[in-house]
Image (cartoon, rainbow, N blue to C red):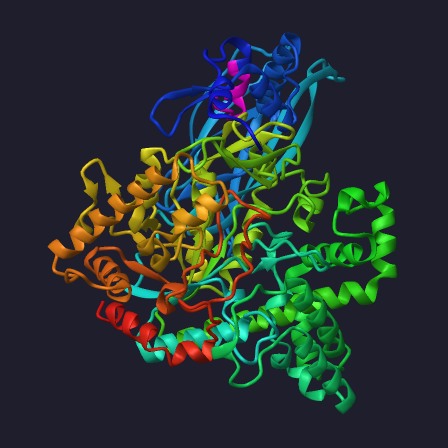
Amino acid sequence: MECTETEHKATAAAVPVTGDLARLAGAFGVATEHHGWRGDVVYADEETVRAVLGALGVDASTPDAVRHALVAHEAARRGRLLPPVIVTRAGRAEAFAAHCEPGARVELWIELEDGGVRRDLAELGRNLPPAVDGTVVQERSYTLPADLPLGWHTLHARVTATEATDLGSGGEPESAAEERHVSVPVAVSPARLPAPPGRTWGFMVQLYSLLSRRSWGMGDLADLADLAGWSARRHGAGFVLVNPLHAASPVAPVEPSPYLPVSRRFTDPMYVRVEAVPEYAYLSPVEHAVAEELRLRTGDLDEGAGAAHTADRLQRDRVRAAKREALALVHRVPRSPGREAAYRAFLAAEGRWLDDHATWCALVEEHGPDWHAWPAELHDPDAPAVRAERRRLAPAVDFHRWCQWVADEQLAHAHRTARDAGMPVGVVHDLAVGVHPDGSDAWLLGSARGGEVLALGATGGAPPDAMNAFGQDWSQPPWHPVRLAEAGYAPYRELLRSVFRNAGAVRVDHILGLFRFWWIPRGNRPDRGAYVRYDHEAMVGILALEAHRAGAVVVGEDLGTVEPWVRDYLVERGMLGTSVLWFERDAAGPVPPEDWRELSFATVTTHDLPPTAARLAGEHVDLWAELGLLPGTMEAARAEAADELASWVALLNDRGLLRPGAGERETVEALHRLLVRTPSRMLGVWLPDAVGDRRPQNLPGTSREYPNWLLPVADGAGRRVLLEDLAADARAASLARVLRGL
């Protein structure tokens, strides 16, 4: 998008939205104003507010429509006997309201997850609010027992309304009873998650970028297991953090960003090590030869070639095509009775979610990657045409279900390897913010059968800030807060269960989106959006409950425009925030290490920032200038970068962590020694920093201008570093020793 800063400023509304439109926006959680990154109040204009409400399915196009929507919203609230879902914390006597006819008999009980029953709900009071549309409803207040166990329970309500009828034979009025029975889920989450075990450190890696000599052109789950075992046993690492391993499109062209998957619920089979599937051993000699030829097509490296191999771009499409063909060979091998039973158990556990995703994959191979361009009768996952295609494409559907099974097995093996090697945390998975609008999650969860819990009429992003003066559009349909609650948060719950299943911790990208999310109506510029609030008690509470069940840690990426209370809230719930060294500054300069947050995942740099070697040399400024990303002049950018670096070097010198005149490698190690001086519970080391890589893995604000997400790990001279090379790398070992002393 091309526009000047002057044009951008002109889009901000000068006055707040008021009246019925403001009340309607408030009823649906649409913020009509927010504090910008400079601390000023930014107002959303009326047109944007109406468009965001429209994306929520609320007609706010005219004053009459707004008034009608307000009445309908209140009528719907009162017409609901129970809230659609109740999420509370352990030890809290959560209050809720029930709506019924005046004088009705209400019976409430809770069916516990373990099969027990509780009837000790307390009634607090009753009142008769003014009638809406001529309808009189009584509102009764109750509280749940404060000692409910953790878990998912079911609240039942049976309401009997009695009405007088004709006189009976004895001259007395007879009565007819009308009975309703409603049940809703109740989630009881831990008040606070336990802190991570001790202090620990680990490598952060984009898994696809770290190849071994046995990889098929990209790093895979067998490489992850090797990296975890080596770094734990050799260097005392406590975890390995990987990029999102969510599913990508099964056909080319493959979206390179792991943060824009087609589904967050499932894994990308690209990460499967073909030879590690047990049935691979039973391929015929001819099939073995075919599989080996496919492996060679991916550009895999011959023994000893790593040191001289230039670090060119990864070939995702080539890898995907080769693995698809090789896995199809293995899929056709008959499974032993035990393996077949395990596969059937996996299918039963995953159920309809897996069937739908596998069906979408088969349809993509048949009709193309954009389901919006499919024949109209295939847009609804429940349509007869889709059921017919599922039957016709049954072998392909089963193949894609099987791919998820073998991926899950290898994920479990990698995490088990990490824990067996002594890692107290193990594999840390990364949960992306959202999904591709053309993907399987959008196809299912944006449909009527999926509850339309994804709002396809908007995309999520970020408002203008210091990093991007025009805002950001991430092209991902956001959760619809009302419909997600009406679905009992089931899609969200299933997503979390999937990502926690083989994890010792989960990093939640942009965890701020569980509190409020920047909605951009389709067709609007990124700055023409508004925040939509979510029930954070529910969103964070369910996250805490699923983490508790998995015995896992939660790391929230809480960078950017943050409401101050949000970080306090995350601490209250026992969730770690994120501290990046270059951002730990205040008006006086670098924040001293002892003043950093304890409940934090601390790093020097990340996948979205320059590698430390490049920052020390100022190369990131040259790259930004080359791509036209500098907000000002080259001279100003260089001066700012030099001043920032000088302030950190001065702090390192003052603390005795760096000698004057030290070189790049010593400075990188000194910055990590500074991390060790912080109280932060988890310390992450960007793996490219361990070998002197100078190229950023991702350059925000670019798409085709830079090979984002396509660069393998390389050394400072641009030579590809394989996993085997890393294990013998003196620089990596030296940096690991800095962290081993935790």
Which is the main secondary structure of the residues drawn in magenta? helix
Q: Quadrant of residue 93?
A: top left
**Rendered location of residue 371, percent (x, y):** 76, 46
Residue 420 seen by the camera: no
Q: Where is 677 relative to 528, above or below?
A: below
**Rendered location of residue 110, percent (x, y):** 51, 44
Q: Quadrant of residue 394?
A: bottom right
Q: Where is 381 relative to 213, above or below?
A: above
Check the picture and name the quadrant holding the N terminus: top right
**Rendered location of residue 356, percent (x, y):** 73, 54
Residue 287 seen by the camera: yes
Outermost residue on the front side: it is: 635
Give the left or right position of residue 526, taking residue 202 as reference.
Answer: right
Residue 30 magenta: yes
**Rendered location of residue 253, percent (x, y):** 70, 56
The span picked out in magenta is: 22-31
Give the left or right position of residue 371, taking residue 553 as reference.
Answer: right
Residue 313 magenta: no
Q: Where is 309 relative to 3, above or below?
A: below
Give the left or right position of residue 248, taking residue 303 as reference.
Answer: right
- Who is closer to the viewer here, 23 or 545? 23
